[in-house]
Amino acid sequence: MTHPTDARNPELDEASASTEYQVRRSDLPLSCPTPEQKLWNAHPRVYLPIEETGSAICPYCSARYTLAD
């Protein structure tokens, strides 16, 4: 399935295509979906506090994020 916004950034990943993601401190602040994901078919962007515990779970899609460094 395609959307008109795909043409602007065809290299973007599908939102919530995976259930587990590894992120780096350079990627913070962490949001779900991430800036590298398409937004048109995703839930509203939510920022996740991952700095203190090293992991976070999105309340919308249950994607798990883990700090890799």
Image: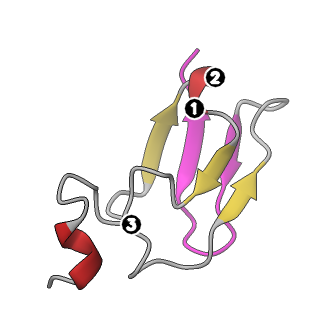
Q: Percent position (x, y) of residue 9?
A: 25, 59
In the rendered view, tell whether residue 5 sits above or below residue 20.
below
Provide the residue designation for mark 2.
Answer: 25
Q: Percent position (x, y) of residue 55?
A: 68, 38
Q: Amino acid at mark 3?
A: Ala
Region rendered in magenta: 55-69
Q: Is residue 49 left or right of residue 30?
A: right
Q: Quadrant of the C terminus?
A: top right
Report how far apart the C-alphas of labels 2 and 1 lie in the structure.
5 Å
Provide the residue designation for mark 3.
Answer: 15
Q: Amino acid at mark 2?
A: Arg
Instruction: Name the disc covering residue 27, or none.
Output: 1
The residue drawn where x is 79% and y is 30% is: 51
Q: Percent position (x, y) of residue 50?
A: 75, 38
Is 66 covered by the magenta stretch? Answer: yes
Q: How many marks?
A: 3
Q: Earlier in the sequence, mark 3 or mark 2?
A: 3
